[in-house]
Image (tube, rainbow, N blue to C red):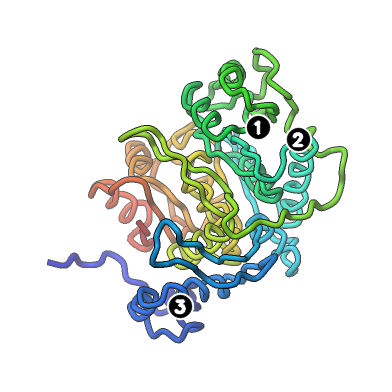
Amino acid sequence: MAATPVWVPDEKTVARSRLGEFLAVTGCADPRSLDHRAREDPAWFWGEAARWLGVEWQREPDAVVAGLDEPHATRWFPGGELNIADNAVDRWVRCGRGAEPALRWETEDGERGCLTFAQLAAEVDRVAAGLLRHGVRFGDRVGIQLPMVREAVVASLACAKIGAITVLLFSGFGEAAVAQRLGDARAVALVCADGFPRRGRTVALREVIAKVAERTPSLRTCVVVSLAGTEVPGPRLPGEVSWDALGTERAGPVEAARCASTHPLMIAYTSGTTGAPKGITLGHAGFAVKAGADAAWCFDVGEGDVSAWITDPGWIMSPITVFGGLVAGSAVAVYGGGVDYPDHGRVWRFAEGAGVTMLGVSPTLVRTLARGGEEAVPEEPATIRVFASSGEPWTPDAFSWLFDRAGRGRVPIIN
């Protein structure tokens, strides 16, 4: 027996939705007819998606897809060149949105801030220039092990802009896990924190990173972001340079590297729960179009919205939210701290302060918040109009708490 929907969009929501915009452009009457046509003609569908997103090519592709009937030989947008960082940030400056918010953040100690698209572009260029000066080249692999702070967003964009390949690393990984991933990728650089505050205490990382460096002979540069607030004891790291010192010798824009459609953007590792972790490469054009389309059609974000996912930069939902949201035209927001510190209402205050309209969560996180009782229930999810989730199945109690209590039965959960 079919389940009864708990939420159905009203006419106003349908009319303003980004999926509705795409349906109108493609001439499809409804999502079902779009789905049917997409299955019949994937090349048409993804070509239309790229055009509708307005991605700007450095070189137009020769086709949307080649070798579709040969899964291991399939190539999307062959012959094309596209830089995802240019599409996520710089093109919005070029089209006159430079003064609009692009990146909002909040730290565990309560610091809040915002960069406009123009300011974010300048910061990305500063870090990109610094990486180049310290020997990071096109195609080099760069590990990023940071909590969900603004520097993690800037670092990933800067790597993408110069054609370096990001290796995603969970901020809570220990020595062995980080060394394994950096070693597999033969990473030449690592952007890391000296430590970071978590629930009022400092998690020190310098000594851990030093041990990782000893096990990673390819590693020659360590960019250290000072997040601990106090000096963290430990040895100097290979090629150590502070985040604040990057790129200070050069002012001005950095030209976006010309990236073939399939040039790797990042290496995202599987969890390792059922076997050895496996690195999956994701390319510039494919990720730009797919993550951008997901952000627009699944999460319904675009210009004027703020996308946020309560996750870690080492998990795939972070780049999907950051790159996807920015390519789709929204701003993004990040929170770097404990979700229940100093109390269970912290996430909702962050969302309200940053003006978040799409909030990504996990069922486990929701169960953590629900344990806080009444203080964990927001007075009103004033700005949030979409909840999103991924990574694990919902349990009825967690779903009901988020939908009925936190969202007042008005905010859909896009799973």
Disc number at residue 20?
Answer: 3
User: Circle 1: is it few (<14), some (14-19), or many (20+) Cα within 10 Å?
Assistant: many
User: Circle 3: is it few (<14), some (14-19), or many (20+) Cα within 10 Å?
Assistant: some
> Quarter of the image holding residue 270?
top left
The residue singled out by tag 1 in the image is: 188
- The residue lying at 36 percent from left, 46 percent from top is 391
Pick whichever, 146 or 137, lies toward us: 137
Report the mark closest to the observer, 3 or 1: 1
**256 lies left or right of 202:** right
The answer to the question of whether label 2 and label 1 lie on touching residues, with beta carbons closer than 8 A, is yes
Pick whichever, 342 or 312, lies toward us: 312
**Mark before the other along the chain sequence, 2 or 1:** 2
At which x and y percent is residue 108?
56, 34
Is disc 2 placed on a helix, strand or loop? loop
- Which amino acid type is marked by label 3? Gly
Report the mark closest to the observer, 3 or 2: 2
- Which amino acid type is marked by label 2? Gly
- The residue lying at 57 percent from left, 60 percent from top is 285
Label 2 – label 1 distance at C-alpha: 9 Å
Does the image show residue 354?
no
User: Circle 2: is it few (<14), some (14-19), or many (20+) Cα within 10 Å?
Assistant: few
Disc number at residue 396?
Answer: none
Up-down relation of residue 238 to residue 103 (above or below): above
Does the image show residue 36?
yes
- The residue lying at 38 percent from left, 79 percent from top is 37
The residue singled out by tag 2 in the image is: 135
Label 3 – label 2 distance at C-alpha: 46 Å
Image quarter in which the C terminus is found: bottom left
Pick whichever, 387 or 298, lies toward us: 298
